[in-house]
Amino acid sequence: MLDTAPAVRRPPGRRPSGRGRPRRRPRIGPYLLIAPTVVVIAVLMFWPMIQIAIMSFQKVGNRQLRGEPAESVGTENFDTILKDPLFWAAFRHTVLFAVVAVTLTMLIGTLVGLLLNKLGKRMSSFVSGGVMVAWATPPVTAAIIFSWLFGSTGGLVNWFLDKLPDALVGGGWNDYNWFSTPLSTYTVLTVCVVWQACPFVAVSVLAGLKSVPRELYEAARVDGSGPWRTFWSLTYPMLKPIFLVVLVMSIIWDFKVFTQLFIMSGMANRDAFNLSLYGYSEAFGALNPKLGMGSAIAAVLTLILLVVTALYVRVMVRQGETR
């Protein structure tokens, strides 16, 4: 005879207590694996940043470097640099250069990535390897190369422009000094930085294009979509996370450009300073170094980059929530 007794039901919303189940112990293996990396980052990055933040509120010079205790000055260093016209000129150069350089880097790098995607496998690999030579070139080497190319004595660019008709480019290019004014200096700097940064964007875009299904492009072609509409309606939405990553990285890199400008312009041309070179000149470029002033400038630059990074993280979080 079958048992027809009604089954006992649990009240809704309650779960079994699970007293008999063993508790899962926290796994410490992953934390142990990343611990060496965290320690290295903390020693090489976080500790110097803390030191810079502390020195930005102190007066640190030759006497303090010889062992005397640093004098706390509060916000005096920040007040001094914010009232200095050279700071605002360097800030303007930094922002304008970053806007132009990042825009050209993203535009040219994207076009090169699209071109590489259209080439055959062998030709794409060959061209990609050649393009990456610019990315692998050290900034010091690139700055020296472009200083030679745009040099006033024997520079290839001046020689080429001097050979062109005067009605087209004007005359007097044979001994023209590209590093005498901020505009011409940053023109050369922009060409150098964009030449080095474009390969990274191109290869990143190429890797993203390889992950897009070909069926989507075939369907767009069948629907009569042109190249421009296909890019904005299909390619750009699919590669938007990649574009955001390379955009933020390009902004950070171009905001703190130092090596190329230091080699091209040097410390004598103060009218062409950006924030990095201005901070270096205040901290190390004088007979009486002002490490507190240099630390304050570095803190301002770091704060700007942290704001850019925070905006990027916010955009990425919003994109993750909408998916």
Image (spheres, grey):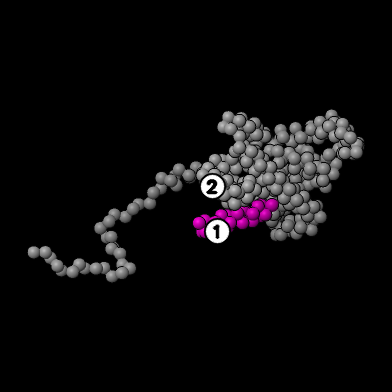
Give the crowd class for mark 2: few <14, some 14-19, many >=20 residues within 10 Å.
Answer: few
Q: Which residues are magenta?
A: 301-323
Give the residue drawn at x 87%, y 31%: 163
Which mark identifies residue 219? 2
**Residue sitting farthest toward the left:** 1
- In x, y percent, where is residue 202? 63, 40
**Residue 119 lies in the magenta stretch:** no
Numbered badge on residue 318? 1
SS at circle 1: helix
Q: Amino acid at mark 1?
A: Arg
In the image shown, does 63 or 210 lie closer to the viewer? 210
Choose between 4 and 299: the one closer to the eye: 4
Relative side of 276 to 5, left or right: right
Residue 163 falls left or right of residue 75: right
Check the image and report above or below for 150 versus 222: above
Closer-to-camera residue (1/149): 1
Q: Is residue 181 left or right of residue 256?
A: right
